[in-house]
Amino acid sequence: MLKVLKILIAASCLSLSLAFAFREIPVPVKKVDSKVNVVVIDAGHGGHDIGTRGRKAREANVALKIALALGRKIKQDTPEVKVLYTRDTDEFIELAERSAFANRNNADLFISIHCNSTPNSKSVRGTETYVMGLHKTNGNLEVAKRENSVILKETNYKQKYKGFDPDSPLAHIMLANYQSAFISSSLRFADSVERKFQSVSDRASRGVKQAGFLVLWRTTMPSVLIETGFLSTPEEEEYLNSEDGQDEVAQSILEAFKVYKKQMDN
């Protein structure tokens, strides 16, 4: 009996010694390679293309301020991510060049910032985030047609965009067939954006939508176009034209980016 007891005590001591020994050995942590290393932020319109307008605000100016604020926040929060802008001044950039810029820089995410408008009402409000796809409503089509009409300000646009007619519904339907390879990731980020607009800044979300946007057409990465609010609605115009409003919009998109990056990295 005494012999058995000595064996048990010896075994316990050995187990305790091993436990302390292994506790002091650092457990190797597998490094996860990030899948979101380069982000291109696109401020819609610019230069002689002012975009939509409110009583005072111009889409091109508001979009640029939000884009720059978002870029600063991403750099501060995730300094390992490279942030690039299609434009950082008030200049006109052709739609084809915006996507080409993202492709040349091997971007992992493309975020195009815009402001919305409707001629029918001064009370419509809320955010919308679009991905490339088939527009299921006339409203989506009208937004795409308005944003795509920018090409009319470009030279030789028919050659550049293979005869694309921004006024043709059929042309937009054909355009919507592109980007299918990235639709899942694009929708994931878009959904996060709309959720954060609600939870972070208490904005009214009009949801995630699909439509044929030329600026998203040739991007070779997940891409979204964010309509940050309606300049045609006085209250939303005042909000979007203010520093606090622009900062809040940028913060909401940042929070969505953080969620998306974590999901993709894992």
Image (cartoon, rainbow, N blue to C red):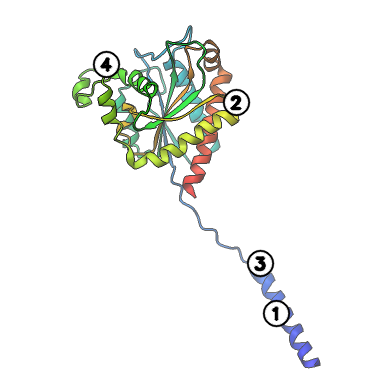
Check disc 3 and give the amino acid type. Arg
Q: Earlier in the sequence, mark 1 or mark 2?
A: 1
Residue 189 falls left or right of residue 104:
right
Can you identify the residue that label 2 sits on? Answer: 202
Residue 202 lies, in percent from the top left, at 60, 26
Can you identify the residue that label 4 sits on? Answer: 152
Q: Earlier in the sequence, mark 1 or mark 3?
A: 1
Can you identify the residue that label 3 sits on? Answer: 23
User: Regarding mark 2 in the picture, which secondary structure is present there?
Assistant: loop
Can you identify the residue that label 1 sits on? Answer: 14
Q: What is the CA distance from the residue labelled 1 to the residue labelled 4?
A: 81 Å
Check disc 2 and give the amino acid type. Asp
Number of the front mark, 1 or 4:
4
Residue 1 falls left or right of residue 248:
right
Residue 55 lies, in percent from the top left, at 48, 6
In the current view of this chain or complex, which residue is farthest to the right? 2
In the current view of this chain or complex, which residue is farthest to the front? 137
Check disc 1 and give the amino acid type. Leu
Q: What is the CA distance from the residue labelled 1 to the residue labelled 2?
A: 59 Å
Residue 30 lies, in percent from the top left, at 51, 58
* Circle 3 crowding by C-alpha within 10 Å: few under 14, some 14–19, many from 20: few
The disc placed on residue 45 is: none
